[in-house]
Image (cartoon, helix red, strand yellow):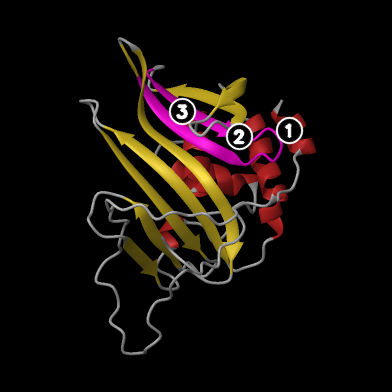
C-alpha cells in the first residue's frame, strides 16, 4: 500500500510556494497521568542555515510569545540534510531516542514534520522508507481531530503497551496527525496528539530579530512559552507573509 501511494502521490500548491523558510503550523495536546490536558498552537519557521523562529498562538502564559534563532542556533535539530537519503531519515529517528525500530521511525518523521515542509519527492522517499519497516499495520479510513480522512500507520513498542499512530493524507502523502498512546484498563489512552495544520514556505518570518551588531544574543536556547491567547489565522495555507494579526 505504501509503495503504491509513493508511486501516485500528488503535489500540493504549497510545494511550489517559494521561500527560504519552511513554515509549519501545528496544534498539540499533551495529557498527564491524572487526565489533565495542556493545549498549545505554534507556527515555526526553519531555514537551511539552522536559523528559525516560533510564534506560540495558543498557550498558558498571559502573553503571546515569540522566539527566534540566529543562524546555527538550531543545529541540534539535525535538519540541514533532511530527506536527503533513507539512511538520514532512519538515523534521525534514532536521535529521537527510541532506537532503530519502527516506532522510532514514526516518532522521528512526526518530529521532523513540526519543522520541515517536504516536497513531493521527499514525501515519496519517506513512504518508501516506511514500506521497508516491519511491524506496521495500516488503517485506510482514519479521521483526524479536524475531520480529515487519512491512512493511519500504527506500530507498538514497549511490549505492546505504547502505540504510535501516524496519519497520512491519501493523495499527497503529507503527515496530517500523530499520536502516542498507552494501554490502560479502559483501552488506549492518548499521551500526545499533534495536528499538522499548515506546511508551506516563506521568504521571511512574521517578525525579524534585531539587525544591530550590538544586539544582545539570547542567553539560552529558548522554547515556546505557551500563552492563554488565540491568534486567529485566516490566511490560505500558502499565504505566509502576514499583514495583520487578530
Name the one closer to the observer, 8 or 80. Answer: 8
Name the one closer to the observer, 148 or 177. Answer: 148
Residue closest to the far bottom: 213
- Neighbour tally class for label 3: few under 14, some 14-19, many 20 plus, Cα within 10 Å: many
Pointer 1 or 2: first along the chain: 1
Q: Quadrant of residue 54?
A: bottom left
Q: Position of residue 188 (x, y in %)?
A: 38, 17
Assign a secondary structure to mark 1: helix
Q: Quadrant of residue 182?
A: top left
Cα–Cα gap, marks 2 and 3:
13 Å
> Which label is found at residue 164?
3
> Which label is found at residue 201?
none
Which numbered mark, 2 or 3, is in the foreground of this view? 2
Q: Is residue 65 left or right of residue 19?
A: left
Residue 96 visible, this orientation: no
Q: Residue at x 53, y 66 (%)?
A: 47
Assign a secondary structure to mark 2: strand
- Neighbour tally class for label 1: few under 14, some 14-19, many 20 plus, Cα within 10 Å: some
Q: In the image, is residue 182 above or below residue 90? A: above
Q: Which residue is mark 2?
A: 168
Q: Which residue is mark 1?
A: 5
Q: In the image, is residue 145 above or below residue 94? A: above
SS majority, magenta: strand
Report the magenta residues as a range.
161-182
Name the one closer to the observer, 160 or 115. Answer: 115
Q: Position of residue 138 (x, y in %)?
A: 61, 21
Residue closest to the far right: 8
Q: Position of residue 140 (x, y in %)?
A: 64, 22
Amino acid at each position: 500500500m505504501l509503495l503504491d501511494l509513493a508511486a501516485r502521490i500528488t503535489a500540493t500548491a504549497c510545494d511550489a510556494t517559494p521561500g527560504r523558510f519552511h513554515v509549519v503550523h501545528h496544534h498539540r495536546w499533551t495529557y498527564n497521568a491524572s487526565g489533565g490536558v495542556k493545549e498549545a498552537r505554534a507556527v515555526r519557521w526553519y531555514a537551511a542555515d539552522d536559523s528559525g523562529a516560533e510564534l506560540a498562538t495558543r498557550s498558558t502564559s498571559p502573553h503571546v510569545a515569540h522566539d527566534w534563532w540566529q543562524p546555527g542556533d538550531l543545529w541540534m535539530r539535525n535538519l540541514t540534510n533532511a530527506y536527503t537519503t533513507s539512511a538520514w531519515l532512519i538515523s534521525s529517528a534514532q536521535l529521537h531516542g527510541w532506537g532503530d525500530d519502527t516506532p522510532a521511525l514514526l516518532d522521528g518523521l512526526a518530529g521532523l514534520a513540526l519543522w520541515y515542509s517536504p516536497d513531493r519527492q521527499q514525501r515519496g522517499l519517506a513512504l518508501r522508507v516506511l514500506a521497508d519497516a516491519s511491524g506496521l499495520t495500516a488503517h485506510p479510513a482514519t479521521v483526524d481531530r479536524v475531520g480529515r480522512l487519512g491512512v493511519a500507520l500504527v506500530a507498538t513498542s514497549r511490549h505492546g503497551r505504547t502505540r504510535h499512530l501516524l496519519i497520512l493524507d491519501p493523495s499527497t502523502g503529507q503527515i496530517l496527525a500523530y499520536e502516542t498512546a498507552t494501554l490502560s484498563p479502559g483501552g488506549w489512552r492518548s499521551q500526545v496528539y499533534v495536528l499538522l495544520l499548515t506546511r508551506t514556505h516563506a521568504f521571511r518570518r512574521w517578525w525579524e530579530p534585531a539587525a544591530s551588531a550590538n544586539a544582545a544574543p539570547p542567553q539560552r536556547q529558548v522554547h515556546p512559552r505557551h500563552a492563554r491567547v488565540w491568534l486567529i489565522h485566516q490566511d490560505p495555507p500558502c499565504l505566509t507573509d502576514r499583514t495583520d494579526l487578530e
